[in-house]
Amino acid sequence: MGRVEKCDICPHSCVFTEKHPVGRCRVRGLGNPGYGMCVGLSVDPIEKKPIFNFHPGARVLSTGPNGCNLTCLNCQNWHISQQRSTAVQYLSPEDLAAMAMDRSDGLAFTYTEPTVWYEYVMDTAPLVREKNGIVIMVSNGYVNSEPLKDLVSVTDAWNIDLKGWSDEFYRKICGGDLITVKNSIEQVARSSCHLELTWLLIPGHNDDPKQVSEAGRWIKETTGENTTLHVSRYFPMYKMDIPATPVPLLNKTADIFRKYLRNVYTGNV
């Protein structure tokens, strides 16, 4: 029958076989082929993640895996999240941690979806923290609760995308589900990690004032009115070609969120 392995990192629950050796994310599979295969190595201000209210002014080395467990039609990093990149290099946990601390104040797992890099994050993050560095996760939140429990134990701050407020949006636009993301946000909020959220505003898809208001109320009740929320402007990308978010709509949506939250910022303007 050959080797068969089941992945328990996210709700897709992919099964790896010799005929289908990798999962939907193209990172996880038989032999963990994506382990340590890094794309997009660069040093960024922490505010670019975006993380505004945790170690402001810090700089972090940013990297991520070559793949993602969602298939967002508007992905801005689709060339590394949705297809195989030629700009990939293997770095051991020791080498990545040393590089991060030589060049910056810590490490950000970002660009694609770092939770599918579970073993690599679990091996690398403690090495950065041993050197008094900070570790950040920029995530879509599409991860099961048990691996998330482990990941928050070795990291310091998270920015989670809350992409919309309907399961239909998540299924059609992202290839996931809303309840998993809500559970992840709630779980990180209960942990010792700093939490910020990002809402990428796509006209006609997640800009309904009633849904925005419901989302704002839920965030306030679940993670607190001091939760930092970034309302970011969408631009045409990957498989979505509708026009960019009008700035007046961006500001209007941010004002709805401000009825519930104290720290709301607009981005990509």
Image (spheres, grey):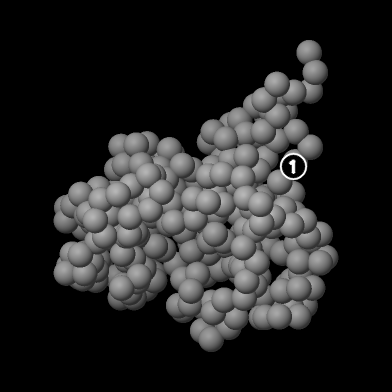
Left or right: 101 as drawn, with respect to 214: right
Q: Is residue 27 above or below residue 93?
A: above
Q: Amino acid at mark 1?
A: Pro
Residue 231 x/y as whole percent: 32, 66
Which residue is most to the bottom?
57
For image coordinates 72% across by 64% down, the residue present is: 125
What kind of element bears circle 1? loop
Instruction: State which quadrant residue 18 falls in.
Output: top right
Query: Is any part of residue 236 visible from this angle?
Result: yes
Can residue 191 be seen here? no
Instruction: Return the residue nearer the eye: 175 or 223.
Output: 175
Looking at the rendered image, the quarter that the C terminus falls into is bottom left
The quadrant in which residue 124 appears is bottom right
Circle 1: is it few (<14), some (14-19), or many (20+) Cα within 10 Å? few
**Residue 60: horizontal and vertical position, in percent?**
62, 75
Q: Which residue position is annotated with label 1? A: 33
Instruction: Tell me where residue 255 appears, x and y as whole percent.
Output: 20, 70
